[in-house]
Amino acid sequence: MRLTPGASADRIEGWDADAEGCPVLKVRVRARPIEGEANAALLKLLARALGVPKSAVCLERGGQSRTKTISVAGLTIDDIRSRLTDL
């Protein structure tokens, strides 16, 4: 996942590929990267978009980086892709 903080609106831009060709979800949030605000906004946005409780979405890696690894309890990667592709 590639997070861009300080955007004009919270939005999920869709899937792209990184330099190695791995799929990456591009997300923008209005929150600034100060004291975890952008990470919290990311988790809230993903929970809402996926239709799961906020507690089901967890930041696994990348707390200080734009590139993040997220896990969602109860959903496979295929479930996540299908739910986010419809946006």
Image (cartoon, rainbow, N blue to C red):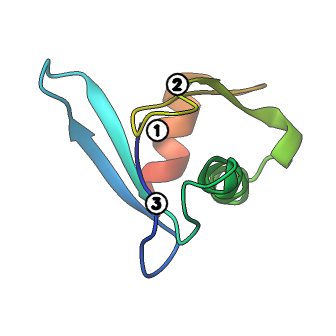
Question: Residue 46 appears at what percent x and percent y?
Answer: 63, 51
Q: Assign a secondary structure to mark 3.
A: loop
The residue beneath circle 1 is: 81
The residue depicted at 65 percent of the width and 59 percent of the height is: 45
Q: Residues within 10 Å of mark 1 (few under 14, many from 20)?
A: some
Residue in the foreground of this view, choosing between 47 and 75: 47
Question: Residue 60 appears at what percent x and percent y?
Answer: 64, 21
Whichever of callouts 3 and 1 sits on the residue coming sooner in the sequence is 3
Q: CA distance from mark 3 to mark 1?
A: 22 Å
- Report the side of 58 relative to 69 (left or right): right
Quarter of the figure with the N terminus: top left
Residue in the foreground of this view, choosing between 39 and 46: 39
Q: CA distance from mark 3 to mark 2?
A: 24 Å
Which of the labelled discs sits on residue 77, or is there none?
2
The residue beneath circle 3 is: 5
- Answer yes or no: do the residues labelled 3 and 2 have beta carbons within 8 Å? no
Question: Residue 38 appears at what percent x and percent y?
Answer: 60, 55
Q: Is residue 80 above or below residue 4?
A: above
Residue in the foreground of this view, choosing between 33 and 4: 33
